[in-house]
Image (cartoon, rainbow, N blue to C red):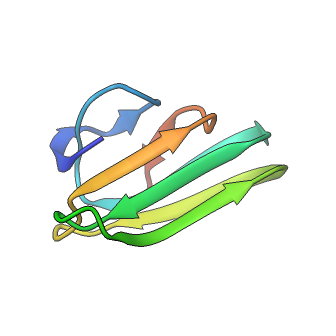
């Protein structure tokens, strides 16, 4: 997913996402997310084998936000 304005709620492989703070909740297993710079450099990432809630802040300068197995992300601010 590219870090550009579009939807307040985004699931995996759904397109673009606006900068902001997002949260996903539920019984999250094998959830992976990654923020990268425009040149592809990994800025931050995490693989959660088991979690109830994950929060990520996507910055306007991010190039992409990639997520797999995390359900839908909802904007919180």
Residue 21 quadrant: bottom left
Q: Quadrant of the N terminus?
A: top left
Q: Count of labels shown?
A: 0
Q: Position of residue 74 (x, y in %)?
A: 46, 43
Q: In this orientation, which residue lies closer to the viewer: 14 or 39?
A: 39
Q: Is residue 4 left or right of residue 13?
A: left
Residue drawn at x 46%, y 30% as measured from the top left: 12
Q: Position of residue 36 (x, y in %)?
A: 32, 63
Is residue 22 in sight in this rendering?
no
Q: Quadrant of the C terminus?
A: bottom left
Q: Is residue 29 above or below residue 52?
A: above
Is residue 15 in sight in this rendering?
yes
Residue drawn at x 16%, y 71% as measured from the top left: 61
Q: Position of residue 18 (x, y in %)?
A: 22, 50
Residue 54 quadrant: bottom right
Residue 16 quadrant: top left
Residue drawn at x 61%, y 48% as measured from the top left: 32
Q: Position of residue 35 (x, y in %)?
A: 39, 62
Residue drawn at x 56%, y 61% as measured from the top left: 55
Q: Is residue 20 left or right of residue 47?
A: left
Q: Is residue 70 left or right of residue 1?
A: right
Q: In this orientation, which residue lies closer to the viewer: 6 or 3?
A: 3
Q: In this orientation, which residue lies closer to the viewer: 33 or 77?
A: 33
């Amino acid at each position: 997913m590219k870090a550009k304005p579009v939807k307040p709620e985004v699931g995996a492989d759904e397109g673009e996402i606006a900068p902001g703070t997002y949260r996903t909740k539920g019984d999250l297993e094998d959830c992976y997310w990654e923020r990268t710079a425009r040149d592809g450099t990994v800025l931050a990432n995490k693989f959660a084998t088991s979690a109830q809630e994950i929060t990520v802040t996507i910055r306007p300068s991010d190039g992409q936000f990639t997520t797999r197995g995390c359900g839908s992300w909802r904007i919180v601010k």
